[in-house]
Image (cartoon, rainbow, N blue to C red):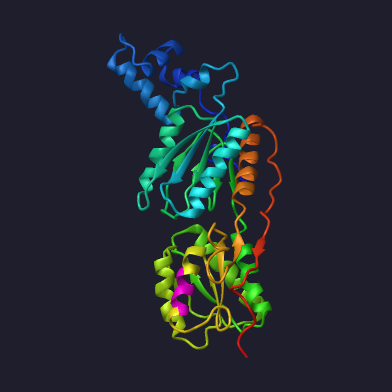
């Protein structure tokens, strides 16, 4: 759940006095440089800025204004998307942060822009936040960032250098495994998988859970079909799967793709669940009202947000204490009418 700080293992954030000592100037001079005051020579300004860069020091005027040294604010780096999972998690984060007495600053990033993550973190640190939350679901490759406050990461951790890095939002593999085991328990010989985009961490977790369930039962692993989370990609995949008479069960990595898949199967004359059973993932609002109502895994976004922020706030308010014990989110399989025993 927690990993130690990098670069020497020190967890203390650099202070202006450290910058002053390294630059060979007074603490007042450091303050003048960062407040952009006049009567500071170019040479002294350069030495102070170089020392600050070397130490990773950032001016935190808001925090200094408080006697506690904290702003009671958190920064969130989130992928700018309307997709159900990231958007719902962000709502949960905001709600929990408010309950805990923390304000939230959000910076959205764009897919395919690794530098945007580092820029977003730098912007939030400049606002004096007490902690950083990374809700970045896509593997953008190496994004080395040095952070002087605790960090909470939902999903796979990025290579941060920070006093403490906390992870939350795991367990998608266990949920995917439960969905696959449900279909196998109904008597299906194997289960096909309509996966999400491979660069998404959660898509990899759900793929791993599906594979683990098949392996545990000794079931054949069919080729993976990849979608892009949209109902349209589920429909396209469904047309191909409908042409294979051996397909009797499909686990889709999200509900939107499952709904598109069911539409394609129905148009091809493959009845759901009489001929093909389908399980989705998320339990979006319409899942209970499509035809047939969709069996799916309900994601506990509020519980995940609460668990993650509890650990982050503990790290902020108790920097010298041990981390809280981790716990996996609950697995909630919602069985509806889209799954049944395989055809005789």
**Nearer-the-camera pick, 306 or 45:** 306
Query: Residue 332, position in %: x, y?
Result: 66, 60
Q: Position of residue 252 (x, y in %)?
A: 52, 69
Pick the front one: 174 or 93: 93
Residue at (35%, 21%) from the top-left corner?
Answer: 47
- The image shows residue 70, relative to residue 309, as above or below, that is above
Residue 340, horizontal then vertical, whole percent: 63, 78
Q: Is residue 56 visible?
A: no
- From this view, report whether residue 245 is shown above or below residue 310: below
Q: Residue at the spot x=54%, y=48% of the render?
A: 89
Is residue 254 in the magenta section?
no
Q: Residue at x 45, y 33 (%)?
A: 124
Task: Look at the image and give the residue range highlighted in magenta.
Answer: 260-266
- Seen in the picture, residue 155 relative to 267 is either above or below; the reply is above
Residue 207 visible to the viewer: yes
Q: Residue 145: percent from the left, percent from the top? A: 45, 41
Q: Is residue 264 magenta?
A: yes
Q: Farthest bottom residue?
A: 344
Q: Quadrant of the C terminus?
A: bottom right
The quadrant holding residue 211 is: bottom right
* Quarter of the rendering containing residue 317: top right
Judging depth in this view, the residue of 30 and 289 nearest the camera is: 289
Q: What main secondary structure does the magenta stretch of the protein show?
A: helix
Give the quarter of the image for residue 188: bottom right
- Is residue 161 found left or right of 240 in the rendered image? right
Q: How many marks?
A: 0
Q: Nearer the viewer, residue 35 or 190?
A: 190
Q: Residue furthest top?
A: 39
* Image position of 32 (left or right of 281): left
């Amino acid at each position: 759940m927690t990993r130690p700080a990098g670069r020497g293992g020190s967890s203390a954030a650099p202070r202006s006095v450290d910058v002053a000592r390294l630059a060979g100037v007074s603490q007042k001079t450091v303050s003048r440089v960062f407040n952009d005051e006049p009567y500071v020579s170019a040479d002294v300004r350069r030495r102070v800025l170089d020392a600050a860069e070397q130490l990773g020091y950032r001016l935190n005027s808001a925090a200094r204004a408080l006697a506690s040294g904290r702003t009671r604010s958190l920064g969130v780096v989130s992928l700018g998307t309307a997709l159900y999972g990231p958007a719902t998690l962000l709502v949960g984060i905001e709600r929990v942060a408010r309950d805990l007495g923390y304000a939230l600053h959000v910076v959205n990033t764009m897919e395919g822009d690794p530098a945007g993550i580092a820029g977003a973190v730098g912007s939030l640190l400049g606002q004096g936040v007490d902690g950083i939350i990374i809700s970045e679901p896509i593997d953008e490759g190496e994004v080395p960032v040095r952070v002087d406050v605790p960090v909470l990461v939902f999903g796979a951790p990025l290579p941060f250098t920070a006093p403490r890095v906390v992870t939350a939002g795991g367990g998608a593999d266990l949920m995917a495994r439960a969905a696959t085991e449900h279909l196998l328990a109904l008597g299906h010989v194997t289960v096909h998988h309509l996966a999400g985009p491979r660069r998404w961490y959660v898509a990899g977790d759900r793929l791993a859970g599906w594979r683990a369930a098949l392996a545990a039962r000794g079931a054949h692993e069919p080729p993976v079909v990849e979608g892009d989370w949209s109902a349209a990609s589920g429909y396209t995949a469904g047309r191909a799967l409908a042409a294979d008479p051996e397909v009797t069960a499909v686990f889709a990595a999200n509900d939107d793709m499952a709904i598109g898949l069911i539409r394609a199967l129905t148009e091809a004359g493959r009845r759901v669940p009489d001929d093909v059973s389908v399980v989705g993932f998320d339990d979006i609002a319409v899942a209970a009202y499509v035809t047939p109502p969709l069996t799916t895994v309900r994601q506990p976004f509020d519980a995940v947000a609460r668990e993650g922020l509890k650990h982050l706030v503990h790290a902020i308010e108790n920097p010298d204490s041990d981390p809280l014990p981790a716990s996996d989110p609950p697995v909630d399989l919602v069985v509806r009418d889209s799954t049944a025993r395989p055809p005789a």
